[in-house]
Each structure stands twice: as structure tokens, then as C-alpha cells.
Image (cartoon, rainbow, N blue to C red):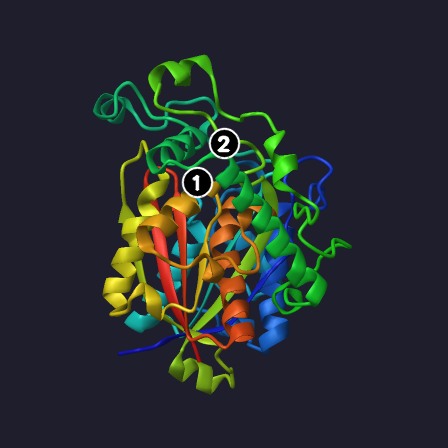
């Protein structure tokens, strides 16, 4: 069987995803092109050898459409012969791109592939692609009457079901900021980033954040309509214990063993196993639990075999519920901080997690790393990589 090797992975520092953020005046194609160009510069790969660029973008509208992958690879200077395609599995889009790239290599269809992703939330806000339209249709509305809900309300349902207090959510969020600040100070992020402006670190990290500061933030999703529908919720979710909106991009170079040897490339890891899972679209963000169980079973590994975890911090309650269900030790989870601090540029976040997971495994001498991503609609991607 073919082996899918990760040769390198790189990301931009993440910027605030609002007007005035460091990338708010940079076209998303240029932002996306930066890590694609960096992969060539860092590895020496001939871009003409790339069989496909598979990219994740969530809001495929405006400057992020059509088929952002194609324009980004051309902006990066790749030959016109290199194809590109853009996929949407919501927040897991670039992690799904990595799965597709891996599948192509394992099948022998690709020798060299790139999985990447971008989101430009400062100018294309979350949900822009809906344009006020009913995206699910009447049959889904009937099945999940009285209707689907926003992710923030799902995060509240999760906090209520697992009994997390506001203090627990805020403590986790503060820990994310403290963990994310230290790698920039210690130079641990330097090897995984390509800088495209004078932004020297992730713009939404707040090193001095405290639980007391977070406790003073107002509730983000409480409203009379939702309170009436879900009387069991004791509202706790705020902007502080949720991920911010961000601009950023990341890319991962994947090859077969034969292609790596032919091009003189030194692999950093291999894609060991991967899985996707579906779950209740009302709780929505709990799919990371069955996805984790599924990928571990497929890999023949247990939670104790994993040396580092990257669990996307869409909301603090999501990661804490996952940890409660899986038993993963928190001292192995998001050790260099997570999305609450670093940021969550939707389409680019899956590849960003891979980039950081590689760094953590190398810094700590670990063998197996697992990343998992919750996604709108009750979906989740899980990936296990093995350092080589």
C-alpha cells in the first residue's frame, strides 16, 4: 500500500478578522498564496510536480470565489498546468482537503498534492454565503422542528448537558491564551509561520487575560427566543470563551514515498489514519467524540497512545466535553494554545491545526498526534499523524 507523507506544513500568523485587522486590506487570494509559495521555498519542490491543490474555504462568495484554490496557486507562481479545487466541509474544510490529498496519494492518483485553506473574515463575515436564505430546506426544518440553531446555542446546550460552569469555561479560555503566548516568546512558532506583513504573531492572543477579566464579559447568545425554547440552559458562553473571527491561511505538502525520494524531499510525518463522522445537528459540535473514537479504532490505537492532541477550540465547552468523553489528559491538548487565543479562520483552520501539531510532536519528541475539528451541521473530521 502507498504511504502518504507530510513533507512540510506552514501557516500565516492569524489576524483579527475585522476591519483594521492586519490582513483586512490583503486580498484573500494573496493571503492564500503566501503559504503555497512558502512550501516551494522551504522544500525546494518543483511546483510543476504538484498533481493537485485542494483547498478549504467556507464562505465561497465574493473575493473567495469561484474556486479560490486555482487563483491562489497561480498567484503563488505555480505553473498553469497545476490544477486546483476548493472544498467545503465547513470549519473542517482544509482538514478535509488533507484527507482528500491523502486519499489521492494512497490510491496512486497523486504523487504530490497540497492541502490548504484560507478565510478572510474581516471582509467576508461568517455566514455571508447564506445571504439571508433558508439553506437547509423544508424537509430538514420538519425533521428538526422547530428549527436549527446557531452554533453558539449548541455550545450552550453542550455546557448544560455536561454541567460546566461559567468559571470552568473562562478558566479554559484563559489557559488557551497563556499557552499560546509562550511559544511566540520562546520561538516555538517561528518554524511554522510565513510572515506576509509586519504582523509578528497571532493578533488575537491576549497574554494578560485572566479569568476575572473574562468573567466580566456579557453573554453572547442569550435571547428571549432561545431562552424560551431551551429553558434548561443557564447561559454561560461569551466572546471570551469562544473562538474569535480571523483572517489567515495554511498549507500542507503531501507526497507518496516514491515521489519524496524522486524529488529529494525529507518527510516530517505520515498521515496514519483519518475519519469523518456525523452527529446530532442540534448539539452540532459533539461530532468530535465519535470522530475520535472512529479514527482511533481505524488506527488500532487507544487514547493513551496519542502524544499530542489538537482539538479546535470553537468554544471552550466543546473541548471540555470532548475531554470528558475521551479521557484525554488536558496537558496533552492544545499545548501551544488553541483557537480561542490563536484564532479560527474557518477554511484555513484544519491545515493550521496540522501545522501546529507537527511542531508540537517535534518539540516534544512525540510519535502520534491526533487533530479533530467540530463542524456545522453535526460533522467532524479526525486525523492521526505519525512523526517520522
Q: Position of residue 134 (x, y in %)?
A: 37, 23
Q: Nearer the viewer, residue 88 or 343?
A: 343
> In the drawing, does residue 365 fall left or right of residue 185?
left
Residue 146 against residue 77 in the figure, above or below: above
Picture quarter with the C terminus: bottom left
Q: Residues within 10 Å of mark 2 (few under 14, many from 20)?
A: many
Which residue is pictured at 49% across the width and 40% down the height? 168
Helix, strand or loop at mark 1: helix
Q: Where is residue 55 in the image (x, y as percent from the top left)?
A: 47, 54
Whether the residues at callouts 2 and 1 have beta carbons within 8 Å, the answer is yes
Q: Which label was assigned to residue 147? A: none
Instruction: Give residue 12's position: percent from left, percent from top.
Output: 63, 57
State how far apart marks 2 and 1 are (Cα).
Answer: 8 Å
Identify which residue is drawn at 64% across, 36% down.
212
Residue 101 versus residue 187: which sits nearer the camera? 187
Which corner quadrant holds the N terminus? Answer: bottom left
Sequence order check, earlier mark of 2 and 1? 2
Question: Relative to 166, is 248 on the left or the right?
Answer: right
**Circle 1 is placed at which residue position?**
317
Residue placed furthest toward the right: 198
Residue 35 located left or right of residue 369: right
Q: Position of residue 330 (x, y in %)?
A: 45, 57
Q: Nearer the viewer, residue 118 or 162?
A: 162
What residue would you read off at disc 2?
237
Give the secondary structure at mark 2.
loop
Q: Would residue 207 be found to the left or right of residue 262 on screen?
A: right
Can residue 75 be spotted in the picture? no
Location of residue 168 with respect to 216 vertically, above or below: below
Foreground residue, 78 or 231?
A: 231
Amino acid at each position: 500500500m502507498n504511504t502518504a507523507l507530510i513533507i512540510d506544513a506552514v501557516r500565516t500568523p492569524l489576524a483579527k478578522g475585522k476591519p483594521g485587522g492586519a490582513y483586512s486590506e490583503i486580498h484573500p487570494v494573496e493571503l492564500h498564496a503566501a503559504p503555497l509559495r512558502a512550501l516551494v521555498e522551504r522544500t525546494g519542490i518543483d511546483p510543476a510536480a504538484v498533481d493537485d491543490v485542494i483547498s478549504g474555504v467556507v464562505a465561497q462568495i465574493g473575493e473567495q470565489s469561484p474556486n479560490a484554490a486555482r487563483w491562489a496557486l497561480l498567484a503563488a507562481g505555480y505553473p498553469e498546468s497545476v490544477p486546483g479545487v476548493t472544498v467545503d466541509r465547513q470549519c473542517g474544510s482544509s482538514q478535509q482537503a488533507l484527507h482528500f490529498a491523502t486519499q489521492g496519494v494512497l490510491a496512486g492518483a497523486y504523487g504530490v498534492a497540497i492541502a490548504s485553506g484560507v478565510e478572510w473574515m474581516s471582509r467576508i463575515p461568517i455566514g455571508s454565503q447564506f445571504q439571508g436564505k433558508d439553506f437547509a430546506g423544508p424537509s430538514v426544518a420538519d425533521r428538526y422542528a422547530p428549527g436549527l440553531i446557531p452554533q453558539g446555542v449548541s455550545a450552550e446546550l453542550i455546557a448544560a448537558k455536561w454541567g460546566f460552569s461559567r468559571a470552568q469555561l473562562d478558566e479554559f479560555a484563559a489557559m488557551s491564551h497563556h499557552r499560546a503566548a509562550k511559544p511566540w516568546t520562546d520561538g516555538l512558532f517561528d518554524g511554522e509561520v510565513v510572515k506576509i506583513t509586519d504582523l509578528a504573531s497571532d493578533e488575537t492572543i491576549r497574554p494578560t487575560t485572566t479569568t476575572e477579566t473574562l468573567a466580566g464579559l456579557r453573554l453572547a447568545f442569550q435571547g428571549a427566543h432561545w431562552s424560551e425554547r431551551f429553558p434548561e440552559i443557564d447561559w454561560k458562553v461569551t466572546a471570551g470563551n469562544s473562538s474569535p473571527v480571523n483572517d489567515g491561511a495554511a498549507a500542507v505538502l503531501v507526497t507518496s514515498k516514491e515521489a519524496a525520494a524522486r524529488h529529494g524531499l525529507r518527510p516530517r510525518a505520515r498521515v496514519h489514519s483519518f475519519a469523518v463522522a456525523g452527529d446530532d445537528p442540534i448539539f452540532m459540535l459533539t461530532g468530535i467524540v465519535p470522530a475520535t473514537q472512529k479514527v482511533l479504532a481505524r488506527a488500532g490505537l487507544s487514547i493513551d497512545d496519542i502524544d499530542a492532541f489538537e482539538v479546535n477550540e470553537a468554544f471552550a465547552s466543546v473541548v471540555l466535553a470532548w475531554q470528558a468523553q475521551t479521557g484525554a489528559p488536558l496537558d496533552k491538548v492544545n499545548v501551544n494554545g488553541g483557537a480561542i487565543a490563536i484564532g479560527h479562520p474557518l477554511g484555513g483552520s484544519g491545515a493550521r491545526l496540522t501545522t501546529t501539531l507537527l511542531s508540537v510532536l517535534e518539540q516534544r519528541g512525540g510519535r502520534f498526534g491526533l487533530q479533530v475539528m467540530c463542524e456545522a451541521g453535526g460533522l467532524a473530521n479526525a486525523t492521526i499523524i505519525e512523526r517520522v
